[in-house]
Amino acid sequence: MELLNILFSLSLVSLFSFATYCYCILWLKPGRMRERIRKQGIEGPPPSFFYGNILEMKSIQSTVAKASIEAGGHASHNYTSILFPYFERWSKDYGPVFMYWTGVTVTIYVGRPDVVKEMNLYKSLDLGKPSRQKKERQALFGHGILTANGQMWSRQRKIIAPELFMDKVKGMVSLMVESTISMLESWESRIGSEGGIIRVDEDFRSLSADVISRTCFGSSYSKGKGIFSRLRDLKLCMSLHTGIPGLRYLPTKNNRKIWRLEKEIGSLILKIVKERKLESTASSEKDLLQIIMDGFDATRVGSESTDRFVVDNCKNIYFAGHETTAVAATWALVLLALNPKWQARARAEVVDVCGVSLPDSDMLRRMKTITMVIQETLRLYPPAPFVAREAFQTMKFGDIQIPKGACAWIPVPMLHHDPQFWGPDAHEFNPERFSNGVFNACKYPHAYIPFGIGTRTCLGQNFAMTELKVLLCLILSKFSFSISPKYCHSPVVKLTIEPEFGVDLFLKRV
Protein backbone atom coordinates (compact mmCIF):
# COMPACT_ATOMS: atom_id res chain seq x y z
CA MET A 1 0.00 0.00 0.00
CA GLU A 2 2.82 2.35 0.89
CA LEU A 3 4.52 1.54 -2.41
CA LEU A 4 1.33 2.40 -4.29
CA ASN A 5 1.11 5.72 -2.48
CA ILE A 6 4.71 6.51 -3.41
CA LEU A 7 4.08 5.61 -7.06
CA PHE A 8 0.89 7.68 -7.07
CA SER A 9 2.73 10.66 -5.59
CA LEU A 10 5.53 10.33 -8.13
CA SER A 11 2.96 10.16 -10.95
CA LEU A 12 1.30 13.33 -9.69
CA VAL A 13 4.64 15.12 -9.42
CA SER A 14 5.60 13.98 -12.94
CA LEU A 15 2.25 15.03 -14.35
CA PHE A 16 2.44 18.40 -12.62
CA SER A 17 6.01 18.91 -13.85
CA PHE A 18 5.02 18.03 -17.40
CA ALA A 19 1.99 20.33 -17.27
CA THR A 20 4.15 23.14 -15.91
CA TYR A 21 6.73 22.57 -18.64
CA CYS A 22 4.04 22.63 -21.35
CA TYR A 23 2.51 25.78 -19.86
CA CYS A 24 5.89 27.53 -19.88
CA ILE A 25 6.75 26.42 -23.41
CA LEU A 26 3.31 26.89 -24.96
CA TRP A 27 2.21 30.05 -23.16
CA LEU A 28 4.66 31.88 -20.90
CA LYS A 29 7.67 31.88 -23.25
CA PRO A 30 5.65 32.93 -26.34
CA GLY A 31 3.82 35.44 -24.15
CA ARG A 32 7.06 37.15 -23.18
CA MET A 33 8.11 37.21 -26.82
CA ARG A 34 4.78 38.72 -27.90
CA GLU A 35 5.15 41.38 -25.25
CA ARG A 36 8.62 42.31 -26.56
CA ILE A 37 7.19 42.63 -30.06
CA ARG A 38 4.15 44.56 -28.86
CA LYS A 39 6.38 47.19 -27.21
CA GLN A 40 7.56 48.08 -30.73
CA GLY A 41 3.99 48.98 -31.65
CA ILE A 42 3.39 45.73 -33.53
CA GLU A 43 -0.04 44.33 -32.66
CA GLY A 44 -1.94 41.25 -33.78
CA PRO A 45 -5.00 39.09 -33.15
CA PRO A 46 -5.35 37.81 -29.55
CA PRO A 47 -4.34 34.13 -29.30
CA SER A 48 -5.88 31.24 -27.41
CA PHE A 49 -3.98 28.71 -25.30
CA PHE A 50 -2.35 25.81 -27.16
CA TYR A 51 -3.84 26.67 -30.57
CA GLY A 52 -2.74 30.30 -30.73
CA ASN A 53 -4.51 31.84 -33.76
CA ILE A 54 -4.97 28.55 -35.66
CA LEU A 55 -8.66 28.19 -34.82
CA GLU A 56 -9.37 31.79 -35.87
CA MET A 57 -7.51 31.20 -39.14
CA LYS A 58 -9.61 28.12 -39.85
CA SER A 59 -12.80 29.98 -38.94
CA ILE A 60 -12.03 32.87 -41.28
CA GLN A 61 -11.05 30.45 -44.05
CA SER A 62 -14.29 28.49 -43.69
CA THR A 63 -16.40 31.59 -44.27
CA VAL A 64 -14.75 32.39 -47.59
CA ALA A 65 -16.15 30.71 -50.69
CA LYS A 66 -13.73 28.93 -53.00
CA ALA A 67 -12.66 30.82 -56.10
CA SER A 68 -14.29 29.14 -59.08
CA ILE A 69 -15.87 30.32 -62.31
CA GLU A 70 -18.08 28.92 -65.01
CA ALA A 71 -16.15 26.84 -67.52
CA GLY A 72 -14.87 29.10 -70.28
CA GLY A 73 -15.48 32.26 -68.26
CA HIS A 74 -12.97 34.93 -67.29
CA ALA A 75 -10.43 33.75 -64.71
CA SER A 76 -9.76 36.18 -61.89
CA HIS A 77 -6.15 36.34 -60.77
CA ASN A 78 -7.06 38.10 -57.52
CA TYR A 79 -6.95 34.94 -55.43
CA THR A 80 -5.02 36.11 -52.36
CA SER A 81 -8.18 37.11 -50.48
CA ILE A 82 -9.53 33.59 -51.07
CA LEU A 83 -6.44 31.57 -50.19
CA PHE A 84 -5.26 33.78 -47.32
CA PRO A 85 -8.33 35.67 -46.05
CA TYR A 86 -7.04 35.82 -42.47
CA PHE A 87 -3.89 37.68 -43.53
CA GLU A 88 -5.94 40.12 -45.55
CA ARG A 89 -8.24 40.78 -42.60
CA TRP A 90 -5.39 41.17 -40.12
CA SER A 91 -3.50 43.48 -42.51
CA LYS A 92 -6.53 45.78 -42.56
CA ASP A 93 -6.85 45.64 -38.77
CA TYR A 94 -3.19 45.88 -37.74
CA GLY A 95 -1.28 47.21 -40.75
CA PRO A 96 1.33 45.64 -43.08
CA VAL A 97 3.38 44.35 -40.13
CA PHE A 98 1.64 42.36 -37.40
CA MET A 99 2.22 39.29 -35.26
CA TYR A 100 0.28 36.08 -34.88
CA TRP A 101 0.84 32.78 -33.11
CA THR A 102 0.42 29.23 -34.36
CA GLY A 103 0.56 27.58 -30.94
CA VAL A 104 4.34 27.13 -30.88
CA THR A 105 6.07 29.93 -32.77
CA VAL A 106 5.41 33.65 -32.63
CA THR A 107 5.44 34.95 -36.18
CA ILE A 108 5.83 38.48 -37.52
CA TYR A 109 4.02 39.03 -40.82
CA VAL A 110 6.19 41.36 -42.92
CA GLY A 111 4.31 43.12 -45.72
CA ARG A 112 6.59 46.15 -46.07
CA PRO A 113 9.00 46.09 -49.04
CA ASP A 114 11.56 48.28 -47.27
CA VAL A 115 11.91 45.65 -44.54
CA VAL A 116 11.97 42.88 -47.15
CA LYS A 117 14.81 44.72 -48.86
CA GLU A 118 16.92 44.76 -45.69
CA MET A 119 16.21 41.08 -45.08
CA ASN A 120 17.19 40.34 -48.66
CA LEU A 121 20.54 42.08 -48.17
CA TYR A 122 21.22 40.26 -44.89
CA LYS A 123 23.75 37.50 -45.65
CA SER A 124 24.24 35.86 -42.26
CA LEU A 125 22.75 32.39 -41.73
CA ASP A 126 21.51 33.61 -38.34
CA LEU A 127 18.37 34.37 -40.31
CA GLY A 128 17.46 30.85 -41.36
CA LYS A 129 14.73 28.35 -42.12
CA PRO A 130 12.22 28.00 -39.22
CA SER A 131 12.97 25.20 -36.79
CA ARG A 132 9.29 24.30 -36.60
CA GLN A 133 9.37 23.39 -40.30
CA LYS A 134 12.31 21.05 -39.73
CA LYS A 135 10.46 17.77 -40.23
CA GLU A 136 8.70 18.91 -43.41
CA ARG A 137 11.82 20.51 -44.80
CA GLN A 138 13.99 17.47 -44.12
CA ALA A 139 11.37 15.11 -45.57
CA LEU A 140 11.19 17.01 -48.85
CA PHE A 141 14.62 18.59 -49.13
CA GLY A 142 16.86 16.86 -46.57
CA HIS A 143 19.36 18.49 -44.24
CA GLY A 144 21.66 20.00 -46.86
CA ILE A 145 20.99 23.43 -48.35
CA LEU A 146 22.08 24.60 -51.78
CA THR A 147 22.57 28.36 -51.86
CA ALA A 148 22.13 30.83 -54.70
CA ASN A 149 25.84 31.32 -55.34
CA GLY A 150 26.33 27.59 -55.81
CA GLN A 151 27.63 26.78 -52.33
CA MET A 152 26.39 23.83 -50.29
CA TRP A 153 25.81 24.27 -46.58
CA SER A 154 25.69 21.38 -44.15
CA ARG A 155 23.64 21.11 -40.98
CA GLN A 156 26.51 22.87 -39.22
CA ARG A 157 26.29 25.71 -41.80
CA LYS A 158 29.72 24.88 -43.16
CA ILE A 159 30.62 25.40 -46.82
CA ILE A 160 31.10 21.97 -48.37
CA ALA A 161 31.70 22.60 -52.08
CA PRO A 162 31.44 25.63 -54.42
CA GLU A 163 30.02 25.98 -57.92
CA LEU A 164 27.47 23.22 -58.35
CA PHE A 165 24.57 24.25 -60.47
CA MET A 166 25.16 27.41 -62.43
CA ASP A 167 27.69 26.03 -64.94
CA LYS A 168 25.37 23.17 -65.86
CA VAL A 169 22.57 25.34 -67.27
CA LYS A 170 24.11 26.34 -70.59
CA GLY A 171 25.01 22.77 -71.44
CA MET A 172 21.50 21.54 -70.62
CA VAL A 173 19.62 23.49 -73.33
CA SER A 174 19.93 20.77 -75.96
CA LEU A 175 18.71 18.18 -73.47
CA MET A 176 15.73 20.38 -72.56
CA VAL A 177 14.92 20.78 -76.27
CA GLU A 178 15.15 17.04 -76.84
CA SER A 179 12.83 16.20 -73.93
CA THR A 180 10.31 18.90 -74.92
CA ILE A 181 10.18 17.78 -78.56
CA SER A 182 9.39 14.26 -77.38
CA MET A 183 6.46 15.61 -75.34
CA LEU A 184 5.16 17.74 -78.22
CA GLU A 185 5.28 14.77 -80.60
CA SER A 186 3.00 12.92 -78.21
CA TRP A 187 0.66 15.94 -78.20
CA GLU A 188 0.51 15.88 -82.00
CA SER A 189 -0.46 12.22 -81.99
CA ARG A 190 -3.11 12.81 -79.31
CA ILE A 191 -4.77 15.89 -80.81
CA GLY A 192 -6.90 13.87 -83.22
CA SER A 193 -7.91 11.16 -80.77
CA GLU A 194 -8.61 13.54 -77.87
CA GLY A 195 -10.42 16.27 -79.79
CA GLY A 196 -7.56 18.72 -79.44
CA ILE A 197 -7.94 18.90 -75.65
CA ILE A 198 -4.72 18.11 -73.77
CA ARG A 199 -4.16 17.90 -70.01
CA VAL A 200 -0.93 19.88 -69.86
CA ASP A 201 -0.08 20.01 -66.14
CA GLU A 202 0.67 16.29 -65.79
CA ASP A 203 2.70 16.31 -69.00
CA PHE A 204 4.76 19.23 -67.69
CA ARG A 205 5.49 17.31 -64.50
CA SER A 206 6.67 14.33 -66.52
CA LEU A 207 8.79 16.58 -68.73
CA SER A 208 10.38 18.39 -65.81
CA ALA A 209 11.00 15.07 -64.08
CA ASP A 210 12.82 13.81 -67.16
CA VAL A 211 15.00 16.93 -67.40
CA ILE A 212 15.89 16.94 -63.70
CA SER A 213 16.63 13.20 -63.74
CA ARG A 214 19.06 13.66 -66.63
CA THR A 215 20.63 16.68 -64.93
CA CYS A 216 21.04 15.01 -61.58
CA PHE A 217 21.86 11.41 -62.55
CA GLY A 218 23.20 11.63 -66.11
CA SER A 219 23.26 8.20 -67.75
CA SER A 220 21.60 6.71 -64.64
CA TYR A 221 18.55 8.96 -64.98
CA SER A 222 16.10 6.17 -65.84
CA LYS A 223 16.78 4.57 -62.44
CA GLY A 224 15.62 7.67 -60.61
CA LYS A 225 12.21 8.15 -62.22
CA GLY A 226 10.39 6.33 -59.44
CA ILE A 227 11.43 9.10 -57.06
CA PHE A 228 9.06 11.65 -58.57
CA SER A 229 5.77 9.88 -57.92
CA ARG A 230 6.82 9.35 -54.31
CA LEU A 231 7.89 12.98 -53.91
CA ARG A 232 4.51 14.12 -55.22
CA ASP A 233 2.70 11.82 -52.78
CA LEU A 234 4.93 13.13 -50.01
CA LYS A 235 4.13 16.72 -50.94
CA LEU A 236 0.40 15.96 -50.85
CA CYS A 237 0.70 14.35 -47.42
CA MET A 238 2.62 17.36 -46.12
CA SER A 239 -0.11 19.71 -47.31
CA LEU A 240 -2.64 17.81 -45.16
CA HIS A 241 -1.02 18.80 -41.85
CA THR A 242 -3.58 20.76 -39.85
CA GLY A 243 -1.12 22.94 -37.95
CA ILE A 244 -2.01 21.53 -34.52
CA PRO A 245 1.16 21.69 -32.39
CA GLY A 246 2.91 18.32 -32.09
CA LEU A 247 0.55 16.49 -34.44
CA ARG A 248 3.32 15.77 -36.97
CA TYR A 249 5.09 13.58 -34.40
CA LEU A 250 2.12 11.29 -33.68
CA PRO A 251 1.79 7.96 -35.57
CA THR A 252 -1.32 8.97 -37.50
CA LYS A 253 -2.14 7.34 -40.82
CA ASN A 254 -0.93 10.40 -42.72
CA ASN A 255 2.29 10.65 -40.69
CA ARG A 256 3.06 6.95 -41.13
CA LYS A 257 2.70 7.41 -44.88
CA ILE A 258 5.05 10.42 -44.75
CA TRP A 259 7.66 8.42 -42.86
CA ARG A 260 7.35 5.50 -45.29
CA LEU A 261 7.67 7.72 -48.37
CA GLU A 262 10.65 9.56 -46.91
CA LYS A 263 12.41 6.24 -46.31
CA GLU A 264 11.62 4.96 -49.82
CA ILE A 265 12.87 8.15 -51.48
CA GLY A 266 16.11 8.08 -49.53
CA SER A 267 16.64 4.40 -50.36
CA LEU A 268 16.11 4.97 -54.09
CA ILE A 269 18.60 7.82 -54.22
CA LEU A 270 21.10 6.00 -52.03
CA LYS A 271 20.92 2.95 -54.31
CA ILE A 272 21.98 5.09 -57.28
CA VAL A 273 24.70 6.72 -55.16
CA LYS A 274 26.12 3.33 -54.18
CA GLU A 275 26.04 2.09 -57.77
CA ARG A 276 27.90 5.21 -58.86
CA LYS A 277 30.59 4.60 -56.23
CA LEU A 278 31.17 1.12 -57.67
CA GLU A 279 31.73 2.52 -61.15
CA SER A 280 35.17 3.22 -62.49
CA THR A 281 36.83 6.28 -60.99
CA ALA A 282 38.01 7.07 -64.49
CA SER A 283 34.47 7.92 -65.54
CA SER A 284 34.30 11.37 -67.08
CA GLU A 285 30.59 11.84 -66.30
CA LYS A 286 30.06 15.10 -64.44
CA ASP A 287 26.36 15.26 -63.66
CA LEU A 288 25.17 16.95 -60.49
CA LEU A 289 25.28 13.71 -58.55
CA GLN A 290 28.98 13.23 -59.30
CA ILE A 291 29.81 16.86 -58.58
CA ILE A 292 28.02 16.68 -55.23
CA MET A 293 29.79 13.44 -54.35
CA ASP A 294 33.20 14.79 -55.35
CA GLY A 295 32.70 18.03 -53.47
CA PHE A 296 31.68 16.36 -50.24
CA ASP A 297 34.37 13.68 -50.40
CA ALA A 298 36.95 16.47 -50.49
CA THR A 299 36.07 17.31 -46.86
CA ARG A 300 37.15 13.80 -45.75
CA VAL A 301 34.00 13.21 -43.74
CA GLY A 302 32.80 9.68 -42.97
CA SER A 303 30.97 7.75 -45.71
CA GLU A 304 27.70 7.70 -43.76
CA SER A 305 27.66 11.49 -43.59
CA THR A 306 28.56 11.65 -47.27
CA ASP A 307 25.63 9.42 -48.21
CA ARG A 308 23.23 11.44 -46.06
CA PHE A 309 24.36 14.72 -47.54
CA VAL A 310 24.19 13.50 -51.13
CA VAL A 311 20.70 12.07 -50.60
CA ASP A 312 19.52 15.31 -48.99
CA ASN A 313 20.74 17.50 -51.82
CA CYS A 314 19.40 15.20 -54.54
CA LYS A 315 15.99 15.50 -52.86
CA ASN A 316 16.45 19.26 -52.80
CA ILE A 317 17.20 19.42 -56.53
CA TYR A 318 14.43 16.96 -57.39
CA PHE A 319 11.65 18.79 -55.57
CA ALA A 320 12.72 22.40 -56.08
CA GLY A 321 13.64 21.93 -59.74
CA HIS A 322 10.83 19.62 -60.75
CA GLU A 323 7.58 20.72 -59.14
CA THR A 324 8.02 24.50 -59.23
CA THR A 325 9.06 24.60 -62.90
CA ALA A 326 6.16 22.38 -63.95
CA VAL A 327 3.65 24.55 -62.05
CA ALA A 328 5.10 27.79 -63.48
CA ALA A 329 4.89 26.38 -67.02
CA THR A 330 1.26 25.40 -66.42
CA TRP A 331 0.30 28.89 -65.27
CA ALA A 332 2.20 30.47 -68.18
CA LEU A 333 0.11 28.53 -70.68
CA VAL A 334 -3.11 29.38 -68.85
CA LEU A 335 -2.26 33.08 -68.98
CA LEU A 336 -1.27 32.99 -72.66
CA ALA A 337 -4.44 31.04 -73.46
CA LEU A 338 -6.50 33.73 -71.73
CA ASN A 339 -4.57 36.51 -73.51
CA PRO A 340 -4.35 35.63 -77.24
CA LYS A 341 -2.70 38.96 -78.14
CA TRP A 342 0.25 38.20 -75.92
CA GLN A 343 0.30 34.64 -77.22
CA ALA A 344 0.55 35.94 -80.79
CA ARG A 345 3.23 38.47 -79.79
CA ALA A 346 5.33 35.80 -78.09
CA ARG A 347 4.94 33.45 -81.06
CA ALA A 348 6.06 36.19 -83.45
CA GLU A 349 9.22 36.69 -81.38
CA VAL A 350 9.98 32.96 -81.49
CA VAL A 351 9.64 32.94 -85.28
CA ASP A 352 11.77 36.08 -85.60
CA VAL A 353 14.58 34.82 -83.36
CA CYS A 354 14.63 31.12 -84.16
CA GLY A 355 13.20 30.90 -87.68
CA VAL A 356 13.12 27.19 -88.50
CA SER A 357 15.97 26.35 -86.10
CA LEU A 358 15.69 24.84 -82.64
CA PRO A 359 16.40 27.29 -79.81
CA ASP A 360 19.89 27.43 -78.32
CA SER A 361 21.26 29.37 -75.36
CA ASP A 362 22.11 32.43 -77.50
CA MET A 363 18.60 32.59 -78.97
CA LEU A 364 17.04 32.27 -75.52
CA ARG A 365 18.99 35.30 -74.28
CA ARG A 366 17.49 37.41 -77.09
CA MET A 367 13.88 36.55 -76.30
CA LYS A 368 12.64 39.59 -74.44
CA THR A 369 8.89 38.98 -74.79
CA ILE A 370 9.15 35.38 -73.61
CA THR A 371 11.16 36.57 -70.61
CA MET A 372 8.55 39.21 -69.79
CA VAL A 373 5.75 36.62 -70.01
CA ILE A 374 7.59 34.32 -67.59
CA GLN A 375 8.33 37.16 -65.17
CA GLU A 376 4.69 38.23 -65.15
CA THR A 377 3.59 34.63 -64.65
CA LEU A 378 5.86 34.33 -61.62
CA ARG A 379 4.47 37.61 -60.31
CA LEU A 380 0.84 36.53 -60.53
CA TYR A 381 1.46 32.92 -59.52
CA PRO A 382 4.72 32.64 -57.55
CA PRO A 383 5.57 29.00 -56.81
CA ALA A 384 6.00 29.51 -53.05
CA PRO A 385 3.35 31.49 -51.14
CA PHE A 386 5.69 32.59 -48.34
CA VAL A 387 9.32 33.17 -47.50
CA ALA A 388 9.75 32.03 -43.89
CA ARG A 389 12.77 32.92 -41.76
CA GLU A 390 13.61 32.36 -38.09
CA ALA A 391 15.88 34.66 -36.11
CA PHE A 392 18.56 32.51 -34.46
CA GLN A 393 19.83 35.71 -32.87
CA THR A 394 17.93 38.90 -32.07
CA MET A 395 18.24 41.18 -35.09
CA LYS A 396 16.80 44.41 -36.44
CA PHE A 397 15.57 45.36 -39.91
CA GLY A 398 14.58 48.97 -40.27
CA ASP A 399 12.49 49.83 -37.22
CA ILE A 400 11.50 46.20 -36.60
CA GLN A 401 13.37 44.06 -34.11
CA ILE A 402 12.87 40.31 -34.45
CA PRO A 403 13.59 38.55 -31.13
CA LYS A 404 15.62 35.36 -31.08
CA GLY A 405 13.31 32.43 -31.75
CA ALA A 406 10.64 34.48 -33.54
CA CYS A 407 9.82 33.93 -37.19
CA ALA A 408 9.25 36.39 -40.02
CA TRP A 409 6.84 35.48 -42.80
CA ILE A 410 6.99 37.41 -46.06
CA PRO A 411 3.75 37.00 -48.05
CA VAL A 412 4.96 36.67 -51.65
CA PRO A 413 1.57 36.72 -53.48
CA MET A 414 0.35 39.65 -51.39
CA LEU A 415 3.45 41.68 -52.26
CA HIS A 416 3.11 40.69 -55.92
CA HIS A 417 -0.56 41.71 -56.06
CA ASP A 418 -0.49 44.95 -54.07
CA PRO A 419 -1.82 47.87 -56.17
CA GLN A 420 0.32 50.27 -54.11
CA PHE A 421 3.42 48.69 -55.63
CA TRP A 422 2.20 47.54 -59.05
CA GLY A 423 -0.55 50.03 -59.93
CA PRO A 424 -4.30 49.59 -60.50
CA ASP A 425 -3.76 46.63 -62.87
CA ALA A 426 -1.92 44.60 -60.21
CA HIS A 427 -4.33 41.66 -60.60
CA GLU A 428 -4.13 41.65 -64.39
CA PHE A 429 -1.75 39.88 -66.77
CA ASN A 430 0.45 42.61 -68.22
CA PRO A 431 3.99 41.48 -69.14
CA GLU A 432 4.68 44.96 -70.51
CA ARG A 433 5.41 46.11 -66.98
CA PHE A 434 8.70 44.15 -67.22
CA SER A 435 9.74 45.73 -70.53
CA ASN A 436 12.51 47.70 -68.79
CA GLY A 437 13.52 44.93 -66.43
CA VAL A 438 12.48 43.93 -62.92
CA PHE A 439 14.01 47.04 -61.34
CA ASN A 440 11.60 49.32 -63.24
CA ALA A 441 8.58 47.01 -63.12
CA CYS A 442 7.10 48.42 -59.91
CA LYS A 443 7.47 51.12 -57.29
CA TYR A 444 9.47 48.86 -54.98
CA PRO A 445 11.63 46.30 -56.88
CA HIS A 446 12.15 44.32 -53.69
CA ALA A 447 8.43 43.54 -53.69
CA TYR A 448 9.17 41.05 -56.50
CA ILE A 449 10.63 37.90 -54.93
CA PRO A 450 9.46 34.78 -56.83
CA PHE A 451 12.75 33.00 -56.07
CA GLY A 452 13.03 33.91 -52.39
CA ILE A 453 15.45 36.27 -50.64
CA GLY A 454 18.92 36.48 -49.14
CA THR A 455 21.48 33.68 -48.97
CA ARG A 456 18.79 31.10 -49.65
CA THR A 457 17.56 32.57 -52.91
CA CYS A 458 16.60 29.67 -55.17
CA LEU A 459 19.73 28.05 -56.54
CA GLY A 460 17.95 26.82 -59.67
CA GLN A 461 16.38 30.09 -60.83
CA ASN A 462 18.55 30.31 -63.97
CA PHE A 463 17.89 26.67 -64.71
CA ALA A 464 14.13 27.19 -64.26
CA MET A 465 14.06 30.30 -66.45
CA THR A 466 15.99 28.48 -69.19
CA GLU A 467 13.70 25.44 -69.07
CA LEU A 468 10.59 27.66 -69.18
CA LYS A 469 11.94 29.58 -72.18
CA VAL A 470 12.69 26.37 -74.07
CA LEU A 471 9.25 24.99 -73.28
CA LEU A 472 7.34 28.12 -74.31
CA CYS A 473 9.42 28.60 -77.48
CA LEU A 474 8.78 25.09 -78.76
CA ILE A 475 5.08 25.04 -77.82
CA LEU A 476 4.42 28.42 -79.43
CA SER A 477 6.24 27.38 -82.60
CA LYS A 478 4.02 24.34 -83.05
CA PHE A 479 0.64 25.12 -81.46
CA SER A 480 -1.89 27.82 -80.75
CA PHE A 481 -4.02 27.15 -77.69
CA SER A 482 -7.07 28.35 -75.79
CA ILE A 483 -8.82 27.43 -72.55
CA SER A 484 -10.82 24.21 -72.70
CA PRO A 485 -14.47 24.22 -71.55
CA LYS A 486 -13.35 21.65 -68.99
CA TYR A 487 -11.05 24.11 -67.23
CA CYS A 488 -12.09 25.49 -63.82
CA HIS A 489 -9.91 28.27 -62.46
CA SER A 490 -9.19 27.50 -58.83
CA PRO A 491 -5.70 28.25 -57.47
CA VAL A 492 -4.91 26.23 -54.36
CA VAL A 493 -1.91 25.94 -52.03
CA LYS A 494 -0.26 22.51 -51.90
CA LEU A 495 3.14 23.77 -50.74
CA THR A 496 3.19 25.47 -54.17
CA ILE A 497 0.38 27.57 -55.68
CA GLU A 498 -1.14 25.37 -58.37
CA PRO A 499 -4.42 24.78 -60.24
CA GLU A 500 -6.61 22.60 -58.05
CA PHE A 501 -8.30 20.69 -60.88
CA GLY A 502 -5.44 20.64 -63.37
CA VAL A 503 -5.37 22.43 -66.73
CA ASP A 504 -6.98 21.28 -69.96
CA LEU A 505 -6.18 23.33 -73.07
CA PHE A 506 -7.58 23.21 -76.59
CA LEU A 507 -4.63 22.92 -78.99
CA LYS A 508 -4.35 23.55 -82.73
CA ARG A 509 -1.32 23.07 -84.94
CA VAL A 510 0.13 26.35 -86.17
Image: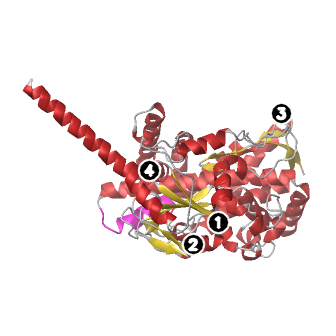
Q: Residue 381 vs residue 401: left or right? A: right
Residue 312 to residue 151: above or below = above
Q: Residue at x 26, y 40 (%)?
A: 16
Q: What is the C-alpha distance between the residues marked 2 and 1?
A: 9 Å
Q: What is the C-alpha distance between the residues marked 2 and 4?
A: 26 Å
Q: Residue 403's x, y, as percent?
A: 44, 66
The reply to whether residue 210 is in sight is no
Looking at the rendered structure, the kind of residue marked 4 is Val
Disc 2 residue crowd, few under 14, some 14–19, many 20+, Cα 10 Å: some
Mark earlier in primary sequence (2, 1): 2
Disc 3 residue crowd, few under 14, some 14–19, many 20+, Cα 10 Å: few
Q: What is the C-alpha distance between the residues marked 4 and 3?
A: 54 Å
The part of the chain drawn in magenta is 283-301
Mark earlier in primary sequence (2, 4): 4
Asked whether disc 4 touches disc 1, contact meaning CB atoms under 8 Å apart, the reply is no
Looking at the rendered structure, the kind of residue marked 3 is Ser
Q: What is the C-alpha distance between the residues marked 3 and 2?
A: 50 Å
The residue tagged 1 is: 449
Of circles 4 and 1, the one toward us is 4
The residue tagged 4 is: 104
Farthest residue to the left: give it. Answer: 2
Looking at the rendered structure, the kind of residue marked 2 is Asn
Of circles 1 and 3, the one toward us is 1
* Nearer to me, 104 or 56: 56
The reply to whether residue 7 is in sight is yes
Asked whether disc 1 touches disc 3, contact meaning CB atoms under 8 Å apart, the reply is no
**Helix, strand or loop status at disc 2:** helix
Asked whether disc 2 touches disc 1, contact meaning CB atoms under 8 Å apart, the reply is yes
